Image: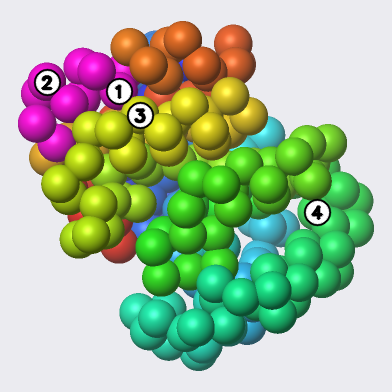
Amino acid sequence: MSCIEAPASSCAMRGEAVVCTTDDQQDVIGVVRWSNPMRETPDVDDLPVNAALITWSGSMSDDLNEADPRNFMRVGHEAFQERCVALRDALVAADRMMVFVPSPLHILSDAPGTRAFQERWSNGPFGILIDPWHLITEDMQDRREEHLERIVELAGPQAWGMRIDPAADPASRSQMLQLWATHRRSHAVTVEGSVAGLPG
């Protein structure tokens, strides 16, 4: 499914952005509300029918821009799993899905950790929106394309969707789209566009 990101104000929706289908219906299938789910309880009551809530995986720190070492340790991942268990029943009861966007500073910070999370929660109500370019850190730049491929190969097969960075090099975009087409699930979402809070 091909989708675009648009300002939430375009459909009078509370949030930073919405993810809409590119067909004539332009159905809202996701609402972006950046928050720290480790510290905040997400509000899903006003989401459109069948729309997912898209947010960060969160941090052990109150500051999402702070690299808290606990995010990369067992204590952080166990706390995140406990938080997901606490959120699960409310999401299931509301028939909603929460889609996490991995980030290098947060608990879901790399492809292997994201893949492990996907396998644990393969029956929902959580999903992953991968942005391969966003996961590239400074020490990965010398083998950038190799790392991009690994991210898609590991996290792509079970992902809710993949965001295509509009600022990425055209050759890199083309390569990632081809790789995504190989590994994605048939109903997975391809998202193009720029949203406040994400690079690009």
Residue 56: x, y in percent?
Answer: 50, 62
Mark toward the start of the polypeptide (3 vs 1) = 3
Note whether 189 is above or below 63 in the view shown: above
Note whether 29 is above or below 94 in the view shown: above
Dot 1 lies on which element? helix
Residue 143: x, y in percent?
Answer: 21, 41
Nearer to us of marks 4 and 2 is: 2
Examine the rendering and report whether any part of residue 11 can be seen.
no
Dot 3 lies on which element? helix
Viewer-closest of 95 and 124: 124
How far apart marks 3 and 1 lie (CA) works out to 7 Å
Magenta part of the chain: 168-177
Q: Main secondary structure of the magenta part?
A: helix
Tag 1 residue = 176
Kindly check if marks 3 and 1 are in contact, taking CB atoms under 8 A apart as contact.
no
Tag 4 residue = 91
Note whether 60 is above or below 197 in the view shown: below
Tag 2 residue = 171
Question: Label 1 sits on what residue type?
Answer: Met
Mark toward the start of the polypeptide (3 vs 2) = 3
Mark toward the start of the polypeptide (1 vs 4) = 4
Find out whether residue 169 is within the magenta segment: yes
**Quarter location, residue 133:** top left
